[in-house]
Image: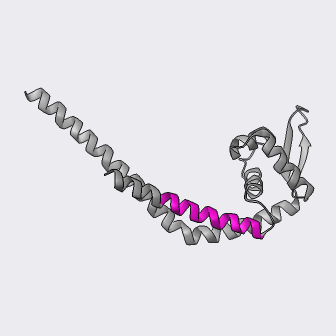
Amino acid sequence: MQADDDRDLAEFRYQIRRFLRASERAARACGLEPQQHQLLLAIRGFPDGQQATVGTLARRLLLAHHSVVELIDRLQARGLVRRQRSARDRRVVIVSLTTRGRRLLRRLSLQHRRLLEEAGPELVRALQQVLARSRRQRQAKRSAHVAARSDRGSA
């Protein structure tokens, strides 16, 4: 049973890595490091009404604050993002995409949609396999637990 779990998880991780590797190559082909691409995507992907601050970007990217500042510095130097102080709190820096940044991100996003069309079915299949096995194991444990309680009650 454990070997089957491990095989399913290994396949799922493999499918994730395949997509991520293709994503990294696409970013580099556009002259970006993968984390720079992720930063552009995170900025653009904020829900309406929320602003991309350095702190919120760090949390969304799971990076240290200073690492995000470095990424922003590099992308700002390339004209892809801009910084602006919040009108309400001058300590808060809001980061947004420039027109050039939006165009580059759009090109990458179209490439990623194609990548997902290719890799998506295998990725979904691998995830479904992991989840299905997990459900079966939980159901088997519940059934065994119910049977054990039933046996104790009739003894």
Secondary structure, magenta segment, majority class: helix
Reply above or below: 22 against 72: below
- Residue 18 can be seen in this image: yes
Reply above or below: 19 against 73: below
Give the residue displayed 35% in from the left and 54% down from the top.
Answer: 3
98 on left or right of 125: right
Give the residue displayed 12% in from the left and 27% down from the top.
Answer: 153
Could you say where residue 38 lies in the image, as x and y percent from the top left?
72, 55
Quarter of the image where one finds residue 101:
bottom right
- Residue 52 can be seen in this image: no
Magenta segment includes 129: no
62 on left or right of 31: left
Quarter of the image where one finds residue 109:
bottom right
**Span shown in magenta:** 12-29
Give the residue displayed 86% in from the left and 35% down from the top.
Answer: 92
Could you say where residue 40 lies in the image, as x and y percent from the top left?
77, 55
Could you say where residue 72 lies in the image, as x and y percent from the top left?
84, 49
